[in-house]
Image: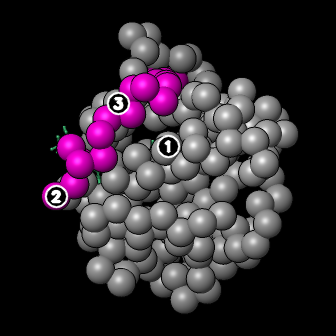
């Protein structure tokens, strides 16, 4: 898994010293509302996440820490389906699908960090992840996340998918979207 960068955003492997900032970000009300992170969120959750994340992906998900100005500023990951994993690194073009998930820490929001990170992992999924489509879903009402994927070129589907995601013991409706290689906007349109 390579480091990826564009403008002020660096995507890198997680480190154990990210724990304090992950805990801060995952105790934020917006993160809690729109993702499936546990509540209450404790340092043990962050340590377990990092230990699962560092090294070989064990569950098909490739995850990066988002770093801005030298500080941990979020998580972004792609869950590759079986076709993508079979394509592997030897076959840059594949039939795979990557499903993307992320959060940006409160101190880094509102200045294009999330859209740059999403552009980088989508581009990586097409070039090296063996994918021909990247998919997304967000709980209905998550306007900032929807706006973010639209900026990168995703096509948001007209109707929500009903009861698609379980969030803390409840099935909830989600918006869905997809991105093909030709939809990806030019990177310079997202740079500050
Ligand atoms: C969604 C999230 C990742 C966006 O990160 P970010 O770095 O702020 O994203 P960007 O700055 O690239 O883009 C956000 C866009 O949403 C817009 N936006 C933010 N709040 C908004 C609101 N309440 N209504 C409408 N648009 C809004 C921003 O203005 C920006 O669009 P613009 O560039 O056209 O002005 C971040 O808010 C977050 O982590 N939220 C909590 C967790 C979460 O929702 N994760 C995603 C689950 S699908």
Looking at this view, is 103 or 114 the one in front? 114
The residue to which callout 3 is attached is 153
Where 106 falls versus 94 (above or below)? below
Label 3: state its secondary structure: loop
Residue at the far bottom: name it.
Answer: 17
Residue 140 visible somewhere in the drawing = no
Name the residue that disc number 2 marks: 192
Residue 105 position in % (x across, y down): 36, 66
Q: Residue at x 82, y 59 (%)?
A: 58
- Which image quarter is the N terminus in? bottom right
- Say which residue appears at 56% left-offset and 64% top-offset: 64
The magenta region covers 167-192
| C-alpha distance separating marks 3 and 2 | 17 Å
Looking at the image, residue 29 lies above or below residue 149: below
At horizontal 59% and vertical 73% (from top left) the residue drawn is: 13
For marks 1 and 2, give the CA distance: 19 Å
Q: Is residue 135 magenta?
A: no
Q: How would you rate the neighbour count of disc 1 (Cα within 10 Å): few for under 14, some for 14-19, many for 20 or more?
A: many
Q: Is residue 90 left or right of residue 108?
A: right
Element under disc 1: helix
Which residue occupies the foreground of this view, 169 or 49? Answer: 49
- Residue 3 drawn above or below residue 151: below
Distance between the alpha carbons at the discs numbered 1 and 3: 10 Å
Residue identified by numbered label 1? 122
Classify residue 41 by image quadrant.
bottom right
Ligand 1 neighbours mark 2 (CB distance < 8 Å): no
């Amino acid at each position: 898994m390579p480091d990826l960068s564009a403008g002020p955003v660096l995507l890198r492997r997680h480190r154990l010293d990210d724990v304090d900032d992950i805990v801060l970000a995952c105790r934020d009300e917006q993160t809690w509302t729109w993702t499936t992170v546990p509540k209450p969120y404790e340092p043990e959750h962050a340590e377990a996440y990092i230990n699962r994340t560092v090294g070989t992906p064990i569950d098909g998900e490739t995850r990066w820490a988002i770093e801005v100005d030298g500080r941990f500023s979020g998580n972004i990951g792609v869950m590759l389906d079986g076709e993508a994993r079979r394509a592997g690194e030897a076959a840059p073009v594949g039939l795979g699908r990557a499903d993307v998930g992320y959060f940006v820490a409160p101190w880094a929001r509102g200045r294009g960090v999330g859209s740059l990170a999403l552009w980088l992992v989508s581009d990586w999924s097409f070039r090296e992840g063996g994918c021909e489509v990247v998919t997304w879903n967000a709980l209905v009402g998550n306007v900032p996340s929807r706006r973010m994927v639209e900026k990168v070129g995703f096509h948001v589907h007209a109707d929500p998918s009903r009861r698609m995601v379980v969030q803390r013991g409840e099935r909830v409706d989600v918006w869905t979207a997809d991105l093909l290689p030709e939809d990806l906007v030019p990177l310079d349109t997202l740079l500050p």
